[in-house]
């Protein structure tokens, strides 16, 4: 509308300024503070009226309490009004086209400045008293009652150090300000900069008043009673406040208390908060429709009653309480971690060490390898602490006592609360690092690159027995005879279970490897599903003169029950994992002898592998056959099938000869495990297994010899020129580039606000669990300084399902998350430089 009225100088007192204390009932309703009347308040809460300018005060993110102060400032400069004479107005209206649904006409506009300055104080009562005195001075400065136009530097500094200031105003320039002196200065110069004034208030009049013939197309016939307005407002404010309180607690208190620990649990809570927020927003949408229906006579008011009924609210409250409980639990954990820290006990969440239900006492100890030579680890969980607090404290004292005697030992608290491993009792476990040179230690290692490591990539169909093979192979290389293995502690790389048949009646027994004591849990791998879903590396020392290490790169088995697409996805993962290594010594295909057919994926697996590696790697291929005792240690019927397949390949000649073929027998290893499980065998069986053990030992040694003497090491680094590799590299760069650009843009915005001398810094953090981001979910909003950041909450996918209910193809896997920090320094580059860098990145 472009109708302009005349402007009038005001007669009433134009300037108002007052301080409101955060614990008054007035302060609870932010919209009421700024004098918004009932119906409009409800419309803002219901998102019918946009929350911009002053109304955005409803988004104030912090809780309001005794440590909150408001300064409400308003200055009315002039009023513009429509002419008093109604005929004049009618003429004006008829001159413009009025094809509109408008119900009212703006009759007058007040121009001026209005601002609510919200000051959050630190919760120290001495400071509060002092701040209140300073705020009184601010009040008189803003009123023009003081001779000063700004605070003195001491007061300004004290205020800056002990408060957080957020301004909501009709003047957008004020909205970015964080320093009280900047605000005072700006407001006191209001008359020098005439243009700063913006509309303050509009007075509306019904359109019929000016144009009785004007027929509204569609107009509400019923007005909601004011008691309803109040009820709805109360309902909406109640949950809005609850959401804010939870979020504050989550973003500031809990995050600080956990100090970087339990990132996964924190993410889960943030996700739960998003869920509550969605519920609330859906409620708003629904109410908006219902109210509309009622006002237009299409619905009954009882439906609104139902939506905000006590039953509904109880249900809502329950959901909020659950999240609050989880939040409080995490706060408790934060306190525990702090307590432990004071006692110099390191906290460790065992989930981050990959401990789950299939683990047992030995594998747990192997996984919990810390740097120190000697550790004392206390195993416990929240439940055990709760039912036996006294024991827990006794054990803690016990730990500290032990360190008093031996100052070199390191104390660790291993928290099993979040692991699927069921811990039955609290206990202290002494753990020694496997530093004994004669005893080979075996553990999962992070990717490291030394030429002293023999890398073997192990590929094979699901069910071929890769896990057992890895365990068996390690033991064959360690113990020359079965007898030696029996009298020593066999090496457990990963727990496996299998069924073995004994005696003339073929009795079936399930045996578990690694199941050495009561710590163990029942659940093992389900048949048909590969135990290994992601690649893992296992490194151990070869007991030879030049101290080489052997790394077996275990991969997801192909022939996945989820189909060929899953196989392709697994292969993609294998290639990506592989591209991180410096070199490969052997590519080992694990097969069973006497197969009647080969898995169709075998072929595709080879082709895809050689889309990453070049032909030189063909000579590094070896074939291993398991369970070959039945075929007298030959590949049996599988050989012609493999030959035929290899001949049909276009990738080049794959050698398949006696030299690069090795036949093992997993049975002798299974026999060892069965013996340890207390299963009896007769002498014939015993003799046979002893023989097959020594054959397997010979084969294992021949394999290592072959790799060391007959094969040229394939260097991955610098040899991955293929499109595939470029793809991986590009995919890895996308997110960092985009995140960097996004942060440049944020800093550019901060730059343009002259009053703000701060910048945002990115802190990437590696995520310790397999995480994804959901591109459908609304991001989590986090206020960093003055900046709302759309923060990504990592989602964890379990059993092909995400708690966010969005489909899996909406999820992209990530390996780091970002934290944001506000730096008191301004961004190190100037505006032009930032623009330049952005342009460069856009063309990268
Ligand atoms: Zn989602
Ligand atoms: Zn999700």
Image (cartoon, rainbow, N blue to C red):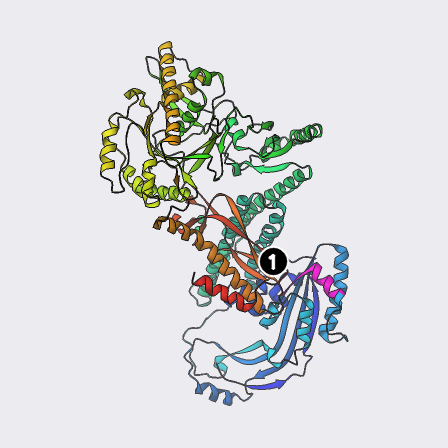
Toward the viewer: 732 or 502?
Answer: 732
Does the magenta portion include 163?
A: yes
Q: State yes or no: residue 834 in magenta.
A: no
Q: Is residue 311 visible?
A: no
Of the pair 403 and 274, the residue shown nearer to us? 403
Figure check: 397 above or below 563: above
Position of residue 145 relative to residue 598, above or below, is: below
Task: Determine the image quadrant of residue 502.
Answer: top left
- Label 1 element class: strand
Q: Residue furthest top?
A: 683
**Most prominent secondary structure in the magenta stretch?**
helix
- Residue 22 in percent (x, y) is at 68, 60
Q: Position of residue 806 (x, y in %)?
A: 41, 50
Residue at (29, 38) in percent of width and height: 601
Give the quarter of the figure containing the C terminus. Answer: bottom left
Q: Horizontal placement of 380 versus 716: left or right?
A: right
Q: Residues within 10 Å of mark 1 (few under 14, many from 20)?
A: some
Dot 1 beta carbon under 8 Å from ligand 1: no
Q: Position of residue 551 (x, y in %)?
A: 44, 33
Residue stretch rendered in magenta on the structure: 154-166
Q: How many marks?
A: 1
Residue 662 percent coordinates (x, y): 33, 26
Q: Nearer the viewer, residue 802 or 583?
A: 583
The residue drawn where x is 38% and y is 30% is: 709
User: Which residue is identified by label 1?
Assistant: 822
Judge whether residue 591 can be spotted in this image: yes
Viewer-side residue, 719 vs 732? 719
- From this view, report whether residue 638 is shown above or below residue 724: above
């Amino acid at each position: 509308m472009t109708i302009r009225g005349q402007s009038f100088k005001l007669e009433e007192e134009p300037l108002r300024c007052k301080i409101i204390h955060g614990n008054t009932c007035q302060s609870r309703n932010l919209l009421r503070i700024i004098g918004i009347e009932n119906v409009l308040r409800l419309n803002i809460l219901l998102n019918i009226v946009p929350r911009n300018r002053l109304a955005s005060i409803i988004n104030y993110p912090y809780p309001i309490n005794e440590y909150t102060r408001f300064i409400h400032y308003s200055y009315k400069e002039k009023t513009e009004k429509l002419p008093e004479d109604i005929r004049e107005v009618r003429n004006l209206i008829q001159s413009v086209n009025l094809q509109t649904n408008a119900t009212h006409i703006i009759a007058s506009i007040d121009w001026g400045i209005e601002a609510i300055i919200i000051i959050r104080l630190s919760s120290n009562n001495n400071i509060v008293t002092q701040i209140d005195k300073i705020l009184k001075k601010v009040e008189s400065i803003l009123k023009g009652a003081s001779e000063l136009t700004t605070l003195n530097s001491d007061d300004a500094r004290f205020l800056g150090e002990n408060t957080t200031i957020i301004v909501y105003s009709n003047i957008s320039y004020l909205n970015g300000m964080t320093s009280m002196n900047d605000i005072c200065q700006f407001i006191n110069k209001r008359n020098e900069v005439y243009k700063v004034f913006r509309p303050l208030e509009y007075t509306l009049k019904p359109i019929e008043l000016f144009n009785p013939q004007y027929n509204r197309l569609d107009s509400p016939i019923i007005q909601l009673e004011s008691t309803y307005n109040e009820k709805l407002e109360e309902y909406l404010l109640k949950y809005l406040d609850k959401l804010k309180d939870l979020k504050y607690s989550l973003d500031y208190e809990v995050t600080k208390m956990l100090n970087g620990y339990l990132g996964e649990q924190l993410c889960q809570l943030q996700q739960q908060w998003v869920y509550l927020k969605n519920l609330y927003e859906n409620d708003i949408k629904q109410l908006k429709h219902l109210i509309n229906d009622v006002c237009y006579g299409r619905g009954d008011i009882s439906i609104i009653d139902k939506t905000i009924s006590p039953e509904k609210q109880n249900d809502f409250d329950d959901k909020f309480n659950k999240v609050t409980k989880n939040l409080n639990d995490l706060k408790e954990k934060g306190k525990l971690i702090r307590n432990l820290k004071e006692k110099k006990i390191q906290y460790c969440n065992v989930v981050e060490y990959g401990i789950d239900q299939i683990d047992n006492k030995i594998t747990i100890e192997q996984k919990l390898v810390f740097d120190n030579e000697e550790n004392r680890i206390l195993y416990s969980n929240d439940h055990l602490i709760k039912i036996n607090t006294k024991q827990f404290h006794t054990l803690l004292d016990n730990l500290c006592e032990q360190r008093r005697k031996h100052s070199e030992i390191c104390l660790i608290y291993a928290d099993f609360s979040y692991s699927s491993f069921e811990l039955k009792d609290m206990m202290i476990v002494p753990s020694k690092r496997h530093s004994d040179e004669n005893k080979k230690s075996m553990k999962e290692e992070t990717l490291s690159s030394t030429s002293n490591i023999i890398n073997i990539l192990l590929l094979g169909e699901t069910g071929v027995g890769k896990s057992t093979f890895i365990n068996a192979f390690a033991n064959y290389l360690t113990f020359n005879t079965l007898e030696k293995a029996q009298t020593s502690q066999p090496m457990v790389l990963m727990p496996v279970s299998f069924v073995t048949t004994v005696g003339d009646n073929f009795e079936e027994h399930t045996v578990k490897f690694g199941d050495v004591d009561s710590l163990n849990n029942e659940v093992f791998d389900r048949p048909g599903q590969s135990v290994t879903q992601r690649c893992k590396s296992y490194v151990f020392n070869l007991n030879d003169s030049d101290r080489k290490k052997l790394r077996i790169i275990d991969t997801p088995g192909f022939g996945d029950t989820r189909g060929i697409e899953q196989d392709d996805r697994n292969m993609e993962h294998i290639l990506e994992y592989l591209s991180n290594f410096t070199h490969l010594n052997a590519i080992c295909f694990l097969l069973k002898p006497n197969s009647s057919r080969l898995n169709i994926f075998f072929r595709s697996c080879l082709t895809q592998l050689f889309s990453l590696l070049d032909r030189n790697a063909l000579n590094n291929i070896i074939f291993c056959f398991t369970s070959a005792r039945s075929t007298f240690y030959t590949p049996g019927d599988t050989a012609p099938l493999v030959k035929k397949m290899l001949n049909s390949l276009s990738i080049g000649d794959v050698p398949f000869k006696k030299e690069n073929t090795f036949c093992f027998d997993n049975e002798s290893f299974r026999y060892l495990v069965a013996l340890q499980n207390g299963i009896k065998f007769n002498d014939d069986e015993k003799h046979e297994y002893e023989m097959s053990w020594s054959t397997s030992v010979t084969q294992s040694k021949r394999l290592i010899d072959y790799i060391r003497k007959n094969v040229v090491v394939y260097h991955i680094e610098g040899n991955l020129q293929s499109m595939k590799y470029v793809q991986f590299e590009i995919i890895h760069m996308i997110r960092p580039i985009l995140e960097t650009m996004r942060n440049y843009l944020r800093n550019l915005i901060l730059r343009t606000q002259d009053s703000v001398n701060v910048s945002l810094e990115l802190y990437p953090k590696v995520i310790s669990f397999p995480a994804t981001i959901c591109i459908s979910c609304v991001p989590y909003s986090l206020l960093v300084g003055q900046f709302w950041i759309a923060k990504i909450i990592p989602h964890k996918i379990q059993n092909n399902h995400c708690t966010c209910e969005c489909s899996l193809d909406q999820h992209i896997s990530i390996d780091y998350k970002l934290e944001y920090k506000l730096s008191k320094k301004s961004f190190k580059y100037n505006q032009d430089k930032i623009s330049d860098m952005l342009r460069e990145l856009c063309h990268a």
